[in-house]
Amino acid sequence: MSNKPQLSIVIPVHNEEENIPKLYEKLRSILLRIEKTYEIIFIDDGSTDDSFEKIKTIKDSRVQVVRFQRNYGKAAALSCGFKKSKGDIVITMDGDLQDDPKEIPRFMKELDKYDMVSGWKSKRYDPITKTLPSRFFNWLTRFITGVKINDFNCGYKAYNNYVVKNINLYGEFHRYIPALAYWRGYSVGEIEVEHHPRIHGESKYGVERLLKGFLDLITVTFLMMYKKRPLHMFGGIGFLLSFSGVFISIYLMFLWLIGERIGDRPLLMLGILLTVIGAQFVSLGLIGELITNSRNNDDYIIKYDSYELENGG
């Protein structure tokens, strides 16, 4: 096998001991037909069953396994898998047998047109307690991010290698990889994929993921829109509050000039409060600008560089 495989399959697993052997066999049968060199990277995300031992029993030099000390979450597992991957194409899938390996050739074909391709489980075999919130979540994410795909949370995705090397994942950010890639300037496509019902094991996602997902959506939006210009956000809020406070103060000053008492008016306290809070927001934005400009600001990806070509890079 070549030292540099053409294809990397990244599979985060957490307590999937019954699914791993069958998943490997399905993957192997498909990958042998593709006739490309490959590696399969299992990321054991702190499993408490025999998942790690099951992976270790696979006698295949193309199978690699990384074991976390504890359960860090899917974003951490994917981030680790992205760093370890060597293939020109990287495909991520879940280890629960609900993603069908036969879709891999279709993903690879679509990568001729896009930088990354996301799966869409249009027909899901999950309870309504998962599918209904997921529909709302996907609609909200489409609306906020502007990325027109149907299923952000599908773990079945394909990437050109340069995409995964330029995405920083933590928290619950794995749900927003299409948005992160899109805001980085990469093209994002989508294909419908077959979804199978879970046979072994239990789902790792509960109701709490909705709150976490929503909070991370706010974080992702803020980072992508205001990471390099914090004053635009905090300054805008600050000027709005300060303007309101100053307008109230001018109004009260006019009343005072015509002889009315204003010392016991709640409106006076509100005007002062808005002015002070507004000034604090502007100051916070300026501090953010100082922090941003004190760091390396080369937060961009060069697709073509004539200087590199001239110097033989």
Image (cartoon, helix red, strand yellow):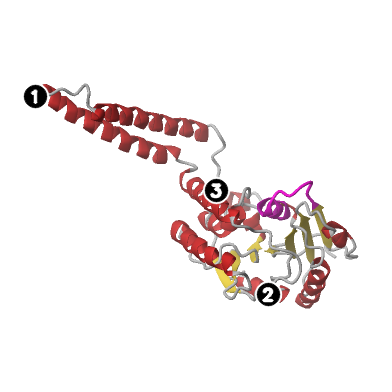
Q: Residue 303 carries which label?
A: none
Q: Which residue is drawn at 52% across and 68% down?
A: 150
Find out whether residue 87 is within the magenta segment. no
How many neighbours does mark 3 have within 10 angstroms: few (below 14), some (14-19), or many (20 or more)?
Answer: few
Q: Answer yes or no: do the residues labelled 1 and 2 have beta carbons within 8 Å? A: no
Numbered disc 3: secondary structure: loop
Q: Relative to residue 13, is residue 297 depicted above or below?
A: above
Per the model, the C-alpha gap separating discs 1 and 3 is: 59 Å
Per the model, the C-alpha gap separating discs 2 and 3 is: 39 Å
Q: Which of pointers 1 and 2 lies earlier in the amino acid sequence?
A: 2
Q: Can residue 114 be seen in this view?
A: no
Q: Left or right: 20 with respect to 185?
A: right
How many neighbours does mark 2 have within 10 angstroms: few (below 14), some (14-19), or many (20 or more)?
Answer: some
Q: Mark 2 points at which residue?
A: 196
Q: Position of residue 63 (x, y in %)?
A: 83, 62
Numbered disc 2: secondary structure: loop
Q: Which of pointers 2 and 3 lies earlier in the amino acid sequence?
A: 2
Q: Mark 1 points at which residue?
A: 258
Q: Answer yes or no: do the residues labelled 2 and 3 have beta carbons within 8 Å? A: no
Q: Give the range drawn in magenta.
A: 67-82
Q: Is residue 300 visible?
A: yes
Q: Which residue is drawn at 53% across and 67% down?
A: 132
Q: Mark 3 points at which residue?
A: 300
Residue type beneath disc 1: Ile
Q: Where is residue 60 in the image (x, y as percent from the top left)?
A: 88, 65
Q: Relative to residue 39, is residue 34 depicted above or below?
A: below
Numbered disc 1: secondary structure: loop
